[in-house]
Image: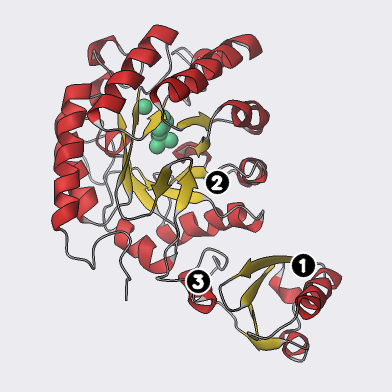
Amino acid sequence: MIIMKAEATKEEIAQVVHEIKKFGLRADVSKGESRTVIGLVGDERKIPFSHFETLPGVKEVIRIETPYKLINREYTKFLENGDGTMEVTIGDVKIGGKEPVFIAGPCAVESREQLFRIAGEAKKAGAHILRGGVFKPRSSVHSFQGLGSAGDDEAREALTWMREAGREFGMPTITEVRGEAQVDLVAEYVDIIQIGARNMYDQDLLCKAAQTGKPIVYKRHFGAGIEEFLSFAEYIAAEGNKNIILCERGILPIGKGKTYTRYTLDLSAVPVIQKETYLPVIVDPSHATGRRDLIMSMSCAAIAAGASGLMIETHYNPKESLVDSQQMITPDELKVVIDTCKSIHKHLAPGVKSKAKVA
Ligand code: PEP
Ligand code: MN
């Protein structure tokens, strides 16, 4: 990370960028209020640190010793642009801002009627963003794969419903991409791209999704450690896209016998990640627990842990849902969850609120 002097000129910054490229690396330029910070992206062995220190306009060259540098909290420190957190803005919605954000909708988009009814009722319940899977990652090839898997026309039709429902009810939309081939198509229709837990390690998918410039909800794999999760998130940032929302959605349960939950919600990941990066962290209690009776308690706990938002699967008639019916809550239940979470957030100590400075 190259910290430029406050008085560094445009030409000096351009020269540093030029030198970085000469060494076969990429430059990540961030302009703060009073200074510019330039991150180096690429094979670290190629970096002659002492050379960069001697270039005009350079204040200092700092080595960040973690595999995630561009999303590191250290990065914002030198930009002096506030409190070490960053908001991701999607239309009127800010994730990582003062208020928690609620993403709700069906697991899978099944029909126009289903989506519109859920969208309208979720909006009334207080949701800010509409979710809905068009391409579903499923454990069995014999189960419903999402309408998008039926073909290009079907995918476009379902994505059109997402866009229309989002516009009708004033909610930005999010849907998952299961593979690189779907990225451009999905980016045409929705506001946020979701990369699911199973694809956390797919670096080509991460780069392709990042290149669209769209905000990305990036879910932690159920077997990934936090350092690993953040190291892979760095691939998105390295494409020049820092509109990343990290999502904790549960890790593999341990021990023999019945585990009682689908995954184990790792809530300490929320404050840990907030201390490591400036990116907002949200929690998905639906996939973490796989149980509708646990959504309320885990949502409250996630907000109390400082999460910037929640993603909750919602359906007016959970039993009818083709996917994940056991973890779906109704819009009425969603309203109670959102109201309770908002009230918990209001009473939180400033140190826990997502926007607060974390020492
Ligand atoms: C989803 O949100 O629809 C989903 C499949 O979640 P995950 O990738 O966390 O399993
Ligand atoms: Mn689901």
Q: Mark 1 points at which residue?
A: 25
Q: Name the residue under label 2.
A: 201
Asked whether mark 3 lies closer than 8 Å to ligand 1, one says no
Question: What is the CA distance from the residue labelled 3 to the residue labelled 1?
Answer: 21 Å
What color scheme is it?
Answer: secondary structure
Question: What is the CA distance from the residue labelled 2 to the residue labelled 3?
Answer: 26 Å
Q: Mark 3 points at which residue?
A: 76
Left or right placement of residue 322 versus residue 22 in this view: left
Q: Which sits in the foreground, 14 or 210?
A: 14
Number of other residues with Cα within 10 Å of mark 1, as a class: few under 14, some 14 to 19, many 20 or more: some
Q: Residue at x 62, y 47 (%)?
A: 203
Mark 1: secondary structure:
loop
Q: Are marks 1 and 2 in contact (CB under 8 Å)?
A: no
Quadrant in which ligand 1 is drawn: top left
Left or right placement of residue 341 versus residue 204 in this view: left
Q: Picture quarter containing residue 48?
A: bottom right
Left or right placement of residue 164 versus residue 131 in this view: right
Q: Residue at x 13, y 57 (%)?
A: 347
